[in-house]
Amino acid sequence: MLKVLLVDDEAPILNNLNRVLPWQEMGMEVAGMARSGMEALRIAEEEAPDLVLCDIRMPMMDGLTFIGKLREMGLESEVLLLSGYQEFDYAREAIRLGVKEYICKPIHYGELGNKVREIGTQIRNRQYKDKLYNSIPLFQELPAAEDSAKKTPDQLMNLAAKIISERLSYDLGIEEVAGRIGISSSYFCLLFKNRFAMTFVEYVTQQRIEAAKFMLSSTDKSITAISSGVGYQERRYFTKVFQKQTGMTPKEYRDQKKRSET
């Protein structure tokens, strides 16, 4: 069973998250519920959850601060953010902290259930790959830099993901990211594919489209501005990539999200 931590300062929402979703059927169990970031950190330290559903807007310690503290503790829990915010800075910070999915409030529990299932599959696949990876000795190139040599493959890839999330609006290449974490390009490609089960280009594209989806659904920024903000200087090319990834144009995606909220 995968462990799940629910975090929301509103008791009705917290209770609905616990009751409405078929956790057992999805192979998961609610290991804890918290109404504040501080309480959530205490539970996370004890339970080490695989998945965290967290509200972004909470008193005392907001969701992004909580996730940052979670990462400082060394926990790599997947995070599904419950968000009502409408600023790109929050989207960018969420991506930097490793948030892969979000649900805009008011919550549509059918959509939420589908995303939780998808994330559960991703977690199990990664756990399986990690076991396989750790059980097979690797004799490929070793990291050259002294600091990099002290880091585990997971730590190196966490650093790579952080660099990518911070530079989504710029041109990115394997050589640049590999150089910044102090390993060779070939070793980087090996670790990256083992960790993320996709190529570097596929991952960067995915992160850019996720950031674009967040902004399209929760801001009024123009599609041209969003395109530029996630690293695509030509709106036409951005539209082509977005449509390939999602099956619809950016405008169609935004319109669909607006209809679902009414």
Image: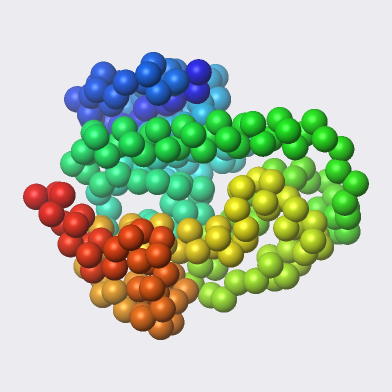
Give the x, y percent position of residue 86: 26, 58
Give the x, y percent position of residue 104: 26, 47
Residue 23 in sight from this viewpoint: yes
Foreground residue, 56 or 81? 81
Tally of numbered tags: 0
Residue 39 in sight from this viewpoint: no
- In the shown orientation, is residue 51 left or right of residue 186? left
Q: Residue at x 68, y 53 (%)?
A: 192
**Corner quadrant of residue 187:** bottom right
Foreground residue, 12 or 51? 51
Give the x, y percent position of residue 48: 55, 25
Q: Residue at x 47, y 74 (%)?
A: 231
**Corner quadrant of residue 10:** top left
Give the x, y percent position of residue 24: 39, 16
Q: Residue at x 48, y 22 (%)?
A: 3
**Corner quadrant of residue 54:** top left
Q: Is residue 144 above or below residue 31?
A: below
Q: Residue at x 73, y 50 (%)?
A: 191
Foreground residue, 7 or 212? 212
Task: Determine the residue located farthest toward the left in the rendered image.
Answer: 262
- In the shown orientation, is residue 150 left or right of residue 201? right
Name the colouring of the figure: rainbow
Foreground residue, 170 or 24? 24
